[in-house]
Amino acid sequence: MNNYIVVLGSNLSSKFGNSAETLKKCVDEIRSNPSIESLLESKWYISASFLNKRDPRYVNVGIRFSTKLKPKKLLNFTSGLENKYGRKRQERWGPRTCDIDILLCDQQILPSKLYFNEWLNLNLSDQIRLVPNELILPHPRLQERTFFLKPLDDLQPDWIHPFLKVKAKEMLDSLPPYELQSIQELKL
């Protein structure tokens, strides 16, 4: 079995409802998939868009589950869900109805340590401009983003990053205070 943590996000309404309603339906669909086992949900969060503060605020939730699906098969499944829930890939990191990021799969580093390290060390302008041509795990921006780290801390605070060798809780605690203040728990 592979153990995953995935974070879903939305800052646009869809035909399924507002951001929270859309993500709730998406999480329910993941939960009902027969290949998904032991699904746990993090708290729900709302935060400003990290790139353009004028964009609508994001709703995020993390999920942890086990499955026999390999990472690339899970990516195909989650990409199909993004499309079903209205995702349009018009602008890198632009507003969206449904975004599903696979943060990690156990202690795997994919596709290789070298490729992971290249993406880990990209400057911001290259991050905005370039799109990886394959799945990178752990997510190369995981350690920088509060909207990834808060759900990860809820679900598995003692997870150790296989490349950085730092616990999830330590990554969260190392963020600047203004980052931690930019995210709030969302009561549904």
Image: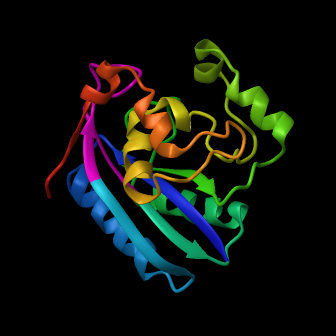
Q: Nearer the viewer, residue 67 or 74?
A: 67
Question: In which quadrant of the rendered view does residue 117 lie?
Answer: top right
Q: Which residues are magenta?
A: 44-62
- Which residue does the image show at 66% across and 17% down from the upper left? 126
Q: Is residue 87 above or below residue 79?
A: above
Numbered circles on residues, count: 0
Q: Position of residue 122 (x, y in %)?
A: 69, 20
Q: Nearer the viewer, residue 72 or 181?
A: 181
| Residue 48, magenta (yes or no) | yes
Q: Position of residue 155 (x, y in %)?
A: 42, 59
- Which residue does the image show at 43% across and 36% down from the upper left? 172
**Quadrant for the N terminus in the image:** bottom right
Q: Is residue 140 left or right of residue 61?
A: right
- Which residue does the image show at 72% across and 68% down from the upper left? 70
Q: Nearer the viewer, residue 57 or 174?
A: 174
Can you name the residue that lies furthest to the bottom here?
A: 34
- Residue 13 visible in the snapshot: no
- Which residue does the image show at 70% across and 56% down from the upper left? 107
Q: Is residue 80 above or below residue 174?
A: below
Question: In which quadrant of the rendered view does residue 71 lie?
Answer: bottom right
Q: Position of residue 48 (x, y in %)?
A: 28, 28
**Quadrant for the C terminus in the image:** bottom left
Q: Is residue 128 above or below residue 19?
A: above
Q: Nearer the viewer, residue 161 or 87?
A: 161
Q: Position of residue 162 (x, y in %)?
A: 70, 46
| Residue 165, magenta (yes or no) | no
Q: Is residue 5 left or right of residue 74?
A: left
